[in-house]
Amino acid sequence: MTKIKPMTPGVSSGARTRAYLAGTVVAFGLFGLGMRAWAVQIDNGDKYRALAERQHEMRLDIPAPRGNVLDAHDQPLAVSADVDSIWANPHDVRDVQATAEKLAVMIGTDATTLEAKLAGDHRFVWLARHVESDVAKQIAAAKLPGIEVAREPRRWYPARSIAGPVIGRADIDGKGLDGIELAMNELLAGKRTSGSALRDAKGHTMLADGIAAAQPGSTVQLTLDRSIQAIAESALADAVATNKPKAGVAVVLEIGTSHVLAMASYPTYDPNSGESHGARNLPVTDAFEAGSVMKIFSVASALENGVVQPDTEFQIGSAVYVGGRPITDHTFDAYLTTTGIIKRSSNIGAAKIALLLGAERLYDGLKLFGFGTRTSIELPGERLGMLRNGKNWRDIDLAHIAFGYGVTVTPLQIAGALASIGNHGMYREPRIVGEVRDGEGNVTYRGEGTEHRALSEKTAGRMMKMLEAVFDKDVLGKGGGTAKDLNVVGFKCAGKTGTAYKFDPVTHSYGNKDHYVSSFAGIAPADHPRLAVVVMIDDPTGPDHYGGSVAGPVFAKIASESLRYLGVPGEAAPPPPVVPGATKPVPKPVKPVVVAPSTEPREVEEVEAPAVVVPSFIGLGVGKALDRARELHLPVEVIGTGRVIAQDPPAGPGASFTKLTLRFSDETRGIH
C-alpha cells in the first residue's frame, strides 16, 4: 500500500488530528450559528423585530400646550405653566424596597404604595405629579436608578375663585371637566403629536429628531369683565352673609350685544383646588319659578298686542277668583293702572291683563322673549326651563303664568329677555365667548348670537317708563313702588322685584310659607340703558324674604359700582354727613405738569405739584373711592376692584404727587 504524504510535512499526526477536530468543531459551530441566525431572522424574524423595537424604540407622546382663557380685557383667567412630575421605569430600578423608602421621605407619601408601582412590569409609571420644585431638585440630585423628573403642563387659575363655576376646571391630564374648560375643551386642548425615538441600554432617549411639534390650543377670550365679575361676586357675598340662603345668582349683560359681563353663583369654588365641591354655574344649570319678575314680560306682551295701555285702569281689591281658585295681593289697592300693576306688583292686576290677552298670545310673547328655548350660550349644562304650549293652558294656568308660577326659567333667560327691553325691543341671544384665536392669532370663532324683534320700539319705551315707576317713593301716602327703599347711588334705574313661594315636591303645593325665591331684574341706567342685571336669592333665611329687600341691594351695588367702573356719567354722590362742630378742610386741586411737545431735545423745567392732604382710601369699594377722589379733585388710577388695600401716596399731609394710585383687593396676581 502506497503511503500518502501529509499535506503539512513536519507537523505531527497528533497536531493534525487536533486541527481537524478543531476545524470540525468550528464548522459545526458556524453551521449552528447560521441555523440560529436563520431561525431568528427568517423563521422568527417578525417576533424578534417586535421585541427589539420594544427594547430600543420608544413612542414619545407630545402633549399640546393648552390654550389660555382670558377676560374681555386680556386678563388671564386660566393659563398653563410647566411643573415637575416624577416617573419611573421599573425595569431599571435596582432595589425596589430601598428606592421606595427613599422616595417616600422626599415626596411625603406611603412607601408601600410606591413599592407596588416600582415592582410592576411596566416601563413607565407616574409616582408623583405636580410636585414642588425643591422636591424635584432633591429627587434629581439623589440619582436613583430608574427614577426620572419630567416637566409637564399644569392648569392655573390666577383669579382664584372669581368666576370659578364659569371657567370650570381641568383634570391633572389637562382635560376640561366643567365650565368653559369643558365646553371649549377641543379647541383649548390643541392637537397632541407622537413619534418614535431610540433609547440606549440604560433607557435614555436619543435620536428623537424630526418629531413634529404639537399644535398649541386656541386662546379663548370671554366677554366677562373680571372687575365687574368681582363686583357682582362681592355684592352677592354680602347678600349671602345677611340672608344665609341656599343659593344665589347674579347675571350682568351688556345691553345691545347681550355679552355676559358677569355671571356669579353661590356656592362657588376655586378651580385651583381641583374640586368643585358640588358648586354649579347656576345661571344656566338651574331653572326657577321666578315669580313677579315675569310680570314684565306678560304685561309687555299685552301692550304689544294692544290689549291694554299704560293708563288702562283695573279694579283690584283683595282677591279675585279664577277657575274657582283665589288670587290675592299683598297690598290692598282698590284700583290700579297697568303702570300701577307693575309698580305695585299686583298679582290680581297681572292675572286680569293675562285673561284679556289670552293663552296663545301670551305663550307666543314669552317665546319671543326666549323662554322655553335654550340660549345656546357657550357653556355646558344649560337648562331649557319649562313653558308648556299655550293651547293646553286653563284659565287658572294663564293667570298663574302671568305672575311667574307654572313656568320655570333660568336667570340667564330672564337677563336676555330684560336686555331686549333696554335694547329697543330687539332680542339677542346671550354670549360669553367673545372670540377664539388659534396658535397663529387667526380668529376662528366669534360669539355672535342671532337676534329678532321681541317688541316694537314703542312698546319697549313704554315698558321702560313703567319699570322706572317701581323705584317711585311713597309720596303723600300715595304708595310707592316695590323698590321704593332701594337707592342706586348716582343713577336712575328701572326694574322689577320678585318674591315667589317655592313649590314643595313632597306636598305638591306652595303651602310652605317659609321657603321663597327672592329676585330683582333691573336695567341701568334708565335714560341710556347699558346693563341688564338679574339677581336671584334661593331660600333666604334672614330677617326678610321680599325681592326688593333681599335681592334689590345686590342689584343696587352691582349697578352703581359697575357703571362707575365703566365710566358712565351719573349724578354726584351725596356728600358725607356733617358732624356738628367739625370743619372740613378744602384741599387744593392738584395741578398736572404740562410739557409742550418738541422734536429737539431740551431741558424741561419740572413743576412740582402742590402739596395736599391725602385722606385714607383703605377699605373703600370702587364706587366710594372714586366718589371721594372726585370730591377732592384728585386724578386717580384704579388697579383691580373690590376693596382698597393700598394707596400711593399714603394718607397724610404734605404729599406732593400728580396721580393717586389705588390698589384693590382682587388685583391681578402672578402665577406662583
Image: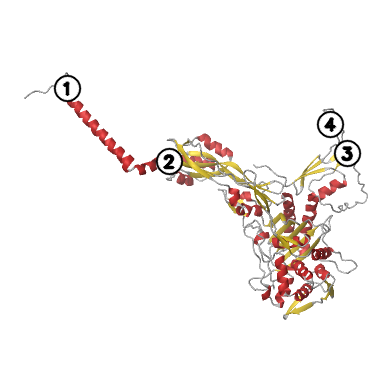
Mark 3 or 4, closer to the camera: 4
**Is residue 641 shown left or right of residue 577?**
left
**Mark closest to the chain's N terminus, 2 or 3:** 2
Amino acid type, mark 3: Lys
Residue with the mark numbered 1: 7
Question: Badge 1, how many Cα within 10 Å: few under 14, some, many 20+?
Answer: few
Residue 29 in percent (x, y) is at 25, 33
Q: Specify which label sits upstream in the sequence, 4 or 1.
A: 1
Q: Nearer the viewer, residue 260 or 614?
A: 260
Q: From the image, tell me which residue sits under label 4.
A: 598
Amino acid carrying label 2: it is His
Q: Are marks 3 and 4 in contact (CB under 8 Å)?
A: no
> In the visual, does 193 lie left or right of 652?
left
Distance, label 3 to label 4, CA atoms, is 22 Å
Picture disc at residue 91: 2
Q: Secondary structure at mark 3?
A: loop
**Of callouts 2 and 4, which one flags the residue occurring earlier in the amino acid sequence?**
2
Residue at screen point 84% across, 33% down: 597
Q: Using the rendered image of the protein, determine whether residue 93 is visible from the camera's viewpoint.
A: no
Q: Badges 2 and 3: C-beta atoms under 8 Å apart?
A: no
Q: Nearer the viewer, mark 2 or mark 1?
A: 1
Q: Which residue is mark 3?
A: 591
